Amino acid sequence: MKLSEFKKRDITFYPVLFLERFYPEQARHSVLSLSQYLFYLFLIGLYMLQYGNNFPYLINLLGLAIIFLTFGVATLMLEAFFLSYYYSGLTAEELDAGRIIYQVKNGDLVSAMLSLPIGQKLQKKLGLRSLVTDNLLTHRQMAVEYEKFELPNLGTDRFFTTTELVLGMYRQDQGFARLLSDNGIGEHDLMTAINSIIKESEELAAKERWWSRENLQGYVH
């Protein structure tokens, strides 16, 4: 299927991608991390209330903390919604491929990928400086035409993977391939790097699903 023929709404996990547009993964994780520290400070504040009015603004601060913690709980529930999609057979590799497709503007897959966390991780894995990739994005003259880019095959019960999509970029986008070649990076290096990133993402996602049978068994033992 051509990229120009693909409709984003046809992605089976479109609701996840739509919500991420307004509340990105990095922002959610930052809020959850901050909520953990704030929760402990909140408990300390409650303990300090036992000493009377020595801290006149403490009640106001605790009120603000409750508001933020409520937002943190809502974020935790939203994060559980995202992670629950793995139970329908969705993998981190398919999710990242969907993120790239959803982010595409004017048919430029490479620019979409490099604007996402997976693209930034790939740059680090390959040892590419941001100045090099910024130069590529600024002078995009060899990007494959939107109508001609051939997407990986879609299965009846699966979305194509990030590995398949990135390989398609490498083989069809001469500007992207030339950038990598000029920095001594070949197809094997690219695939090794992307597979390493996907493996790390899958392992992290598995740990975050604390309610999964495997993780709950770990707590029991």
Image: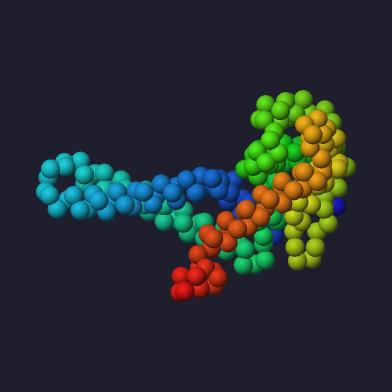
Q: How is the image coloured?
A: rainbow
Position of residue 134 measured from the top left corner of the image (x, y, whole percent): 69, 28
The one nearer the camera, 154 or 117, is: 117
Position of residue 160 measured from the top left corner of the image (x, y, whole percent): 76, 56
Residue 57 visible in the picture: yes
Position of 173 relative to 32 (above/below):
above
**In the figure, is residue 73 to the left or right of 169?**
left
Position of 94 relative to 216 (above/below):
above
The one nearer the camera, 48 or 185, is: 185
The one nearer the camera, 212 or 20, is: 212
Position of residue 51 measured from the top left corner of the image (x, y, whole percent): 12, 49
**In the figure, is residue 4 to the left or right of 50?**
right
**In the figure, is residue 169 to the left or right of 42?**
right
Seen at 52% across and 56% down, the residue is 79
Position of residue 15 measured from the top left corner of the image (x, y, whole percent): 62, 56
**In the figure, is residue 71 to the left or right of 13?**
left
Quarter of the rendering containing residue 132: top right
Position of 96 relative to 148 (above/below):
below
Seen at 12% across and 43% down, the residue is 54
Seen at 86% across and 41% down, the residue is 172
